[in-house]
Image (cartoon, rainbow, N blue to C red):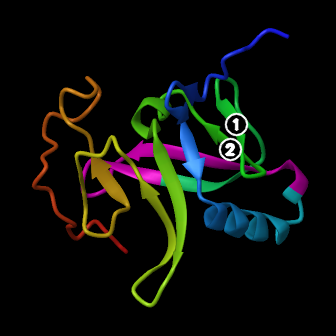
Amino acid sequence: MATVEHPLETTAGPLVALTPLAAAKVKALMAEEPDADTLVLRLAIQGGGCSGFQYGLGFDSGSAEGDLELEIEGVRVVVDPFSAPYLRGATVDFLNTIEESGFKIENPNAAASCGCGHSFTVAEDADPAASPAASADVGCGSGCSH
């Protein structure tokens, strides 16, 4: 049998990871949806946020053309090709503590994050698409609702 490299796999492991706790929470939330058997978890980055980029994490009805697909901890995960380089090596976790509750993304590509962790910036030399105005000193401004 020939080995085929999956587009979401790197030499260091999968493009993105879900902790077992995050996967369990995603599965529980998906189970509440009427079309649960067709849903995928979409992980993306979008322009905006107080630090330059913000994370998108939610259910989608399936993958779109060009999406990278992977099954992690029993959850079908899709990442669009634009977001993939920015998310390489990221881990999605679920926190349920007195201090905070919700999904948290640990992203090794983030040079700086806002105080709430929902937006981030990358080093200018990491990707030419990164905003030249992005700075490691960017804090969580009034644009952050978390």
**Picture coordinates of residue 142 (x, y %)?**
22, 71
Magenta residue span: 37-55
Relative side of 143 to 84, left or right = left
x, y percent for residue 10: 53, 26
Local packing at callout 2 (Cα closer than 10 Å; few below 14, some 14-19, many 20+) is many
Instruction: Report the residue at 26% width, 40% height from top.
Output: 122
Kindly report the distance in space between the C-alpha atoms of the residues bearing marks 1 and 2. 5 Å
- Image quarter hosting the N terminus: top right
Relative horizontal placement of residue 104, taking residue 72 as reference (left or right): left
Q: Secondary structure at mark 2?
A: strand
Q: Nearer the viewer, residue 75 or 13?
A: 13
Q: Which residue is tagged 2?
A: 77
Q: Count of labels shown?
A: 2
Q: Earlier in the sequence, mark 1 or mark 2?
A: 1
Identify which amino acid the numbered label 2 is placed on. Answer: Val
User: In the orientation shown, which residue stands out farthest toward the bottom?
Assistant: 98
Left or right of residue 53, residue 102 in this image? right
Q: Is residue 114 magenta?
A: no
Task: Residue under label 1, please give it.
Answer: 70
Quadrant hosting residue 58: bottom right
Against 142, residue 88 (above or below) is above
Numbered badge on residue 82? none
Left or right, residue 127 beside residue 83: left
The x and y percentages for residue 132 are: 14, 33
Residue shown at 35% from the left, 73% from the top = 145
What quarter of the picture does the C terminus occupy?
Answer: bottom left
